[in-house]
Every structure is written in C-alpha cells, then in structure tokens.
Image (spheres, rainbow, N blue to C red):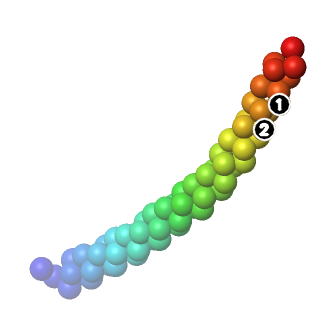
Amino acid sequence: MTNTKLDLKNKNREQLLEMLKVAKKDKEDFVANLLKNKEKNVTKLRQLRKNIARIQTAVNALEEKN
C-alpha cells in the first residue's frame, strides 16, 4: 500500500476508535441514569404503597362504622 492509503486507513481507524470511546461513554451514562431513575421509582412506589395502605385502612374503618 502507498503511504497515502496507509495514512487514510490509520486516520479512519483513529476516528472509529474515537467513535467507539464516545459510544461506550454514552452507554455508561445511559446505564447510570437508568439505575438512578430505578432508585427514584422504587422510592415513589414504596410511598404509593404506604399511601394506599393508609387509605385502605381508613376505608375499612368507615365500612366497619356503617
């Protein structure tokens, strides 16, 4: 191969490696964000369950009075 072809091949390789590095970083950020949101959603779900239990207790108490 000529020097020009080798230079072009190396440049393409470097660009692809840079793209790969960026894609891997994007994936890591995406996964980290998913995990963070999962924790928030689990907390919200727990709060909702507690609220439902309180409301159900109140409903049961009202039904017992009637």
Residue of label 2: 54
Q: Whole-Å distance between the Cαs marked 2 and 1?
A: 6 Å
Q: Is residue 5 at all visible to an observer of this figure?
A: yes
Residue in the foreground of this view, choosing between 16 and 57: 57
User: Image quadrant for the C terminus?
Assistant: top right
Task: Specify the farthest residue to the bottom.
Answer: 3
1, above or below 19, in the image: below
Q: Position of residue 63 (x, y in %)?
A: 81, 19
Task: Specify the farthest residue to the left.
Answer: 1
The part of the image, by quadrant, that contains residue 49 is top right
- Secondary element under disc 2, as helix, strand or loop, is helix
Task: Specify the farthest residue to the front.
Answer: 65
Report the residue at 61% width, 52% height from top. Answer: 42
The part of the image, by quadrant, that contains residue 3 is bottom left
- Secondary element under disc 1, as helix, strand or loop, is helix
Q: Is residue 8 at all visible to an observer of this figure?
A: no
Residue type at mark 1 is Ala
Residue of label 1: 58
Image mark count: 2
Taking the image as shown, residue 35 lies to the left or right of residue 4, namely right
Q: Position of residue 27 (x, y in %)?
A: 45, 63
Report the residue at 34% width, 75% height from top. Answer: 17
Taking the image as shown, residue 43 lies to the left or right of residue 19, namely right
Report the residue at 41% width, 69% height from top. Answer: 24
Taking the image as shown, residue 31 lies to the left or right of residue 54, namely left
Q: Position of residue 20 (x, y in %)?
A: 37, 70
Residue type at mark 2 is Arg
Residue in the foreground of this view, choosing between 14 and 61: 61
Q: Position of residue 14 (x, y in %)?
A: 34, 78
Decide: marks 2, 1 in contact (CB < 8 A)? yes
Label 1 Cα crowd, 10 Å radius (few <14 / some 14-19 / many 20+)? few
Label 2 Cα crowd, 10 Å radius (few <14 / some 14-19 / many 20+)? few
